[in-house]
Every structure is written in structure tokens, then in C-alpha cells.
Image (spheres, rainbow, N blue to C red):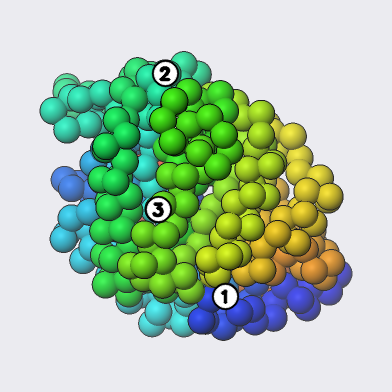
Amino acid sequence: MTTIDKLLTPVRVGDFTLANRVFMAPLTRSRASQPGDVPSALNARYYAQRATAGLIVTEATQISRQGQGYAWTPGIYSDAQEAGWKAVVDGVHAAGGAVSLQLWHVGRISNRLLQEDGQAPVAPSALRAVNSKSFVVQPDGTAGNAPTDTPRALETAELPGIVADYAAAARRAVRAGFDFVEIHAANGYLLHQFLATGVNQRTDQYGGTLENRARLLLEVVDALVAEIGAARVGVRLSPNFVAHDIEDAESEAAAIYLAQQFSRRKLAYLHIAEPDWVGGPALTTEFRTALRQAFTGALVFCGNYTAEKAEALIAAGTADAVAFGRPYIANPDLVKRFAQGAALNTPDPSTFYGGAEQGYTDYPALAD
Ligand code: FNR
């Protein structure tokens, strides 16, 4: 058995010392209670089962009704949602864990059925993501994938309102007890749509140059730093990501520029979602090293990692922690399994999204 000593050592993130460097990646599971997309006792049990992770990053959570692109995902804009999340956080803390809320606005990856009064989804430009799907409940009650609707381009004057929605969500998150929030600027959603050269065709100060395309994300970062402090703020980026109709000629340059900007603002962590698990080109060692040099906070990588690969990246000094997605769906006690070199349960993709306990809270832990 390879030793994985470093992976299991504490790590400093923001003002916290976390127990180990095995993080749980954000994973949409589409099991919020209805009506109202409210986190439930079942959701709390699922997260508490996984509380031995150094840090849990929750499933992506919409900051507003406008920011929703899939039915049954949780929100953080109503009092009921905040109360539901508080119970989740209390459960994770009682089990000794730490937890970050992933803040989400899907932008154009949505459908009118999810939007207030059937309005069009919003995006940097009125370009439809033709190869992407939203997930909706139809008026007759049947649920399923649906084409995304053509978005409307956001007016410049509307952008402060979006920034304010992020700030209000972060305020609720901290009130619910979250240790961190993670700004979801990855995987082809709103903030990534602004960054991407092929999706953002704006001619105002939010389009064109890299600095302009990064402006909205940095305004969100600055609003959250003002609201809850830099030591509680992380960001997720996905350089070279290709799904959700993202085309970006400058994605690596953007990630390096942003890493430097986040460093200047002393953000707690930067979370890099590597693209190869969804068909993008694998990141190079040179690029990972450049990110390390650009960012002085805690640097987290995620995507197709094993314990051994994670240990090597941490031992090389490139990563401070590694997040695991699919392994965490199937292994609530992933840290213990890594520590013991035990076999891992296999995740079942048919129960990833929607449903109840099955494939959610019933994966077995190792016997004591
Ligand atoms: C994801 N991923 C994801 N990413 C994100 O930033 N927010 C999210 O809500 C989700 N939801 C989600 C659901 C499911 C079912 C999967 C499989 C993936 C991506 C995830 O965080 C991670 O980047 C990938 O799963 C790759 O890591 P692993 O699974 O190879 O460790």
C-alpha cells in the first residue's frame, strides 16, 4: 500500500485548520424538498454521514429563482431554505466537520418553466446553449430533461442586482452557520458565461477584454469579501471546460489572471475543477504549477483523482487539498477507507439525480 500521509494531515484554509486534505466536491443530487427547494432532514443526514471530509463543499445552490436551471436543486434565498441549511450545517458541525456552501446562478442553462412568470433565462448575450439541457417539471407533472431556452442579454444596469443577490445569499449562508461560501464560476454557468470569449459578446464594460469579462466575477468576490470577509470566500473555476456549449479562447490565461486577483484579495481558497472527466483536455503540470505560483491561499484540485494521485500532487507542493466527487457519492467514510487502504464502493449513476434514500444515504460505511 502506498503511504498517503500528507493527504491525511491538517490544512489551514482561511481562519480554520481543517482535519485533513480530502475534500468533498460539490455534487448536485436534486433532492431538495418541495415546494420551495428547501434542504431537508434527509439532506442533513447525507451531509453528516460525510463529515469526516476535511471540508464538504455542498451541491450547487441557487442564489435566486432566476439562477435555477434544474428542478429540485436547493436554494438560499428564502427563510425556509436558510433554516433547512442551518440544520444541515448543525449536523456537519456536530459530527466534527466543516462546510462551504456553493453559490450558483445558472445563467442561460435554464428553461422558462423554472423562471418566474415564464420569463426567459438571463445571460451575458442572447445566445442559446444548443447542446445543453435543463431539467424541468412539466405542467402535467412529468419531470425530465428539456432544451434550454434562448436567454435574454442582461442589461448593464441589472448587474448590480445580480451581485446583490450573491451578497444576500452569502449573508444567509453565514447566518446559517456555514464556514465558507464557494462562488461557482465553473462548468458553464453564469459567471463562466461572462468569462468565456465564445459566449460573452457584450460591448459594455463587462465584455471584450479579459479584464472586462472577469469584471462581474470580481465584483461578486468584492461584494462577498465586504459582506463576510475574505477568509470565508472560495471560488471554483474550470479552465479548459468544454461542456454546456462553452467556448473560451483564453481560459487558461483567465484562470491565471483571476488566481492573481484572488490572491491580492486574500481569498481562503481556489478550487480548480479539472475538465477531463467531461471530455475536456487534461490540465498540464506546467499549468497547475502556474496556478500554484499565482495563488497564495489554499489551492484545491478536483477531477478523476485517486488517493495516490492526490498524495503526489500535495507532496509536490502543487495542491493543498484534493476534492473527490463520485467517490464521495458512494463512500461516506472515504477518509477512513483511504487511511486503511480499504476498497471503495462503486457509485451508481442511475441514482445521482433525484429520488430519496436509495443511492443517497444508503451506501454502506466500513464496519467498525
Ligand atoms: C458534479 N459536479 C459538480 N460541480 C460543481 O461545481 N457543482 C455541482 O453542483 C456539481 N454537481 C455534480 C453532480 C454529479 C452527480 C457529478 C458526478 C458531478 C462536478 C464535480 O464536483 C467534480 O468536478 C467531478 O465529479 C469530477 O470529480 P470526480 O468525480 O472524478 O472526483
**In the image, residue 180 lies at what x, y percent?**
44, 69
SS assignment at label 2: loop
Please say whether residue 146 is visible from this viewpoint.
Answer: no
Give 336 or 222, whichever is nearer the viewer.
222
Q: Which residue is mark 1?
A: 13
Q: Is residue 355 left or right of residue 79?
A: right
How packed mark 1 is, by other alpha carbons closer than 10 Å (few <14, some 14-19, many 20 or more), is many
In the image shown, does 49 or 127 lie closer to the viewer? Answer: 127
Q: Which tag, 1 or 2, sits closer to the chain's start?
A: 1
**Nearest the eye: 60 or 208:** 208
Give SS at disc 1. strand
Left or right of 29? Residue 74 is: left
Which residue occupies 43% across, 44% down?
216
Q: Position of residue 249 (x, y in %)?
A: 66, 29
Q: From the Cβ of disc 1, is ligand 1 less than 8 Å away?
A: no
Q: Give the vertical position of 339 relative to 63 (above or below).
A: below
| Residue to which mark 2 is pinned | 128
Counting residues from the N terminus, which is met first, the one under dot 3 or under dot 2?
2
- Relative placement, left or right, of 5 versus 104 is right
What amino acid is found at the position of numbered circle 2 in the picture? Arg
Residue underneath mark 3: 220
